[in-house]
Amino acid sequence: KVLGFCLAAWFLALSVERNRIYRSGESFYRAAVSCNPLSARAWSSLGAALLLKGENEAGVAHLRRAIALDPGLGTPHYNLARLAFAQGRLTEAREEVERAIKNAPGDVEAMVLSALVAERRGDLAGMRRGLEKALAVLPGHALARYNLGRYWLLVGRRDLAAAFLTPPQ
């Protein structure tokens, strides 16, 4: 009986600890970083989780650490580009999203962000190219379709916009 009680208590303690770690993305990625401090993906994910919480300075520091560990990883560049875009720093956003795409050429989210950066910079042709590239990789991507529909509206082509602003059949 004592052994059974001890085992149950031990499993309960493990469950409580696991629940603490999995409580949030941030706590999960903090645990991942502590288990593997050389994992660029763990640092990148922790940085992204902190950005979502609005802890931009710490998030950027972790994303930069991820880049230092693996300069070829696209995700930290993408997240730096998202932050720069949200803050209106379009030159930095463009540079970071270009790095993200260079490191991860099939990243549709980065292609869409690149197109939105182009739009904000007044480059509608670049917007269209980016969205068409994204849709060539993933034809049903909802955000790319929506934004390509918006592009067609911006250039006065309601007839073409309709195909992208209605759900695919």
Image (tube, grey):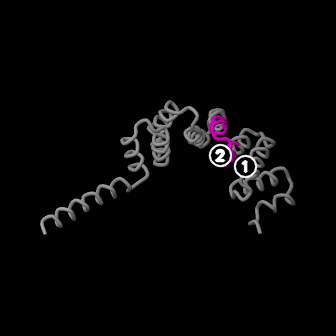
Q: Is residue 27 magenta?
A: no
Residue sitting nearer the eye, 149 or 98: 98
- Inspect the image, locate mark 2, and give the three-letter code of the amino acid beneath it: Asp
- Inspect the image, locate mark 1, and give the three-letter code of the amino acid beneath it: Ala
In the rendering, at what x and y percent does residue 17 appear?
A: 29, 55
| Of the image marks 2 and 1, the number of the one nearer the N terminus | 2
Q: Which mark is residue 107?
A: 2
Residue sitting nearer the eye, 69 or 81: 69
Specify the principal SS of the magenta part: helix
Q: Which mark is residue 167?
A: none
Residue sitting nearer the eye, 161 or 25: 25
**What residue is pinned by disc 1?**
134
Q: Residue at x 81, y 58 (%)?
A: 161
Q: Is residue 112 magenta?
A: yes
Q: Residue at x 64, y 41 (%)?
A: 104
- The magenta segment: 98-114
